[in-house]
Image (cartoon, rainbow, N blue to C red):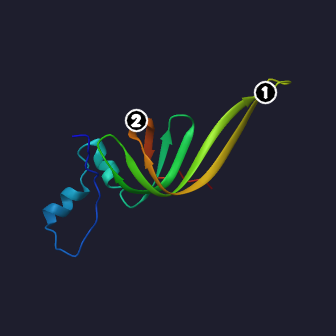
Amino acid sequence: AGRHAFTSFSLNNSLHTLHEMKSALTVEEPLDLIRLSLDEKIYVKMRGDRELRGKLHAYDQHLNMILGDVEETVTTVEIDDETYEEIIKSSKRKIPMLFVRGDGVILVSPPLRTS
């Protein structure tokens, strides 16, 4: 009862009707946008000032996700004891494969372009 099916999308060698192909690309509800991002790099903003960028392998209706080739960025804000100025620090790390619990997700989008 506690198990959830993850949605994964792969095109195999079978032929698809035009209607099936059109419905596969149609956005009718919010999770359809996530479905269209399967096997693509996405950006995930998490609670606790965490950001993830990685390839979406699977997801479910709770926004639990499996990401591959992940770069995690954690941002912290400290206050300087003498000047009381905010010191913003960020640390990054690479994670080969990551399970993301959906209740920590704030936002999901294609990766933000940083130039």
Count how many numbered circles sit on residues in the image: 2
Mark 1 belongs to which amino acid?
A: Glu
Which of marks 1 and 2 precedes in the sequence?
Answer: 1
Q: Residue at x 22, y 76 (%)?
A: 13
Mark seen at residue 23: none
Cα separation, mark 2 vs mark 1, equals 32 Å
Q: Where is residue 71 drawn, in percent x and y?
A: 56, 54
Mark 2 belongs to which amino acid?
A: Asp
**Vertical comparison of 61 with 14: above or below:** above
Q: Does residue 88 appear left or right of residue 20 in this picture?
A: right
Q: Where is residue 94 drawn, in percent x and y?
A: 58, 56
**Vertical comparison of 30 with 25: above or below:** above
* Mark 2 burial class by Cα count in 10 Å: few <14, some 14-19, many 20+: few
Residue 62 position by quadrant: top left
Q: Circle 2 sits in a helix, a strand or a loop, which is it?
A: helix
Q: Does residue 89 appear left or right of residue 20 in this picture?
A: right
Q: Residue furthest bottom?
A: 13
Q: Circle 1 sits in a helix, a strand or a loop, which is it?
A: loop
Q: Nearer the viewer, residue 35 or 101?
A: 101
Residue 51 position by quadrant: top right
Q: Residue at x 45, y 36 (%)?
A: 104
Residue position marked by numbered label 2 in the rendering: 103
Q: Residue at x 44, y 40 (%)?
A: 107
Quadrant holding the C terminus: bottom right
**Vertical comparison of 46 with 68: above or below:** above
Mark seen at residue 85: 1
Q: Where is residue 49 drawn, in percent x and y?
A: 57, 36
* Mark 1 burial class by Cα count in 10 Å: few <14, some 14-19, many 20+: few
Q: Residue furthest front?
A: 1
Q: Residue at x 60, y 46 (%)?
A: 73
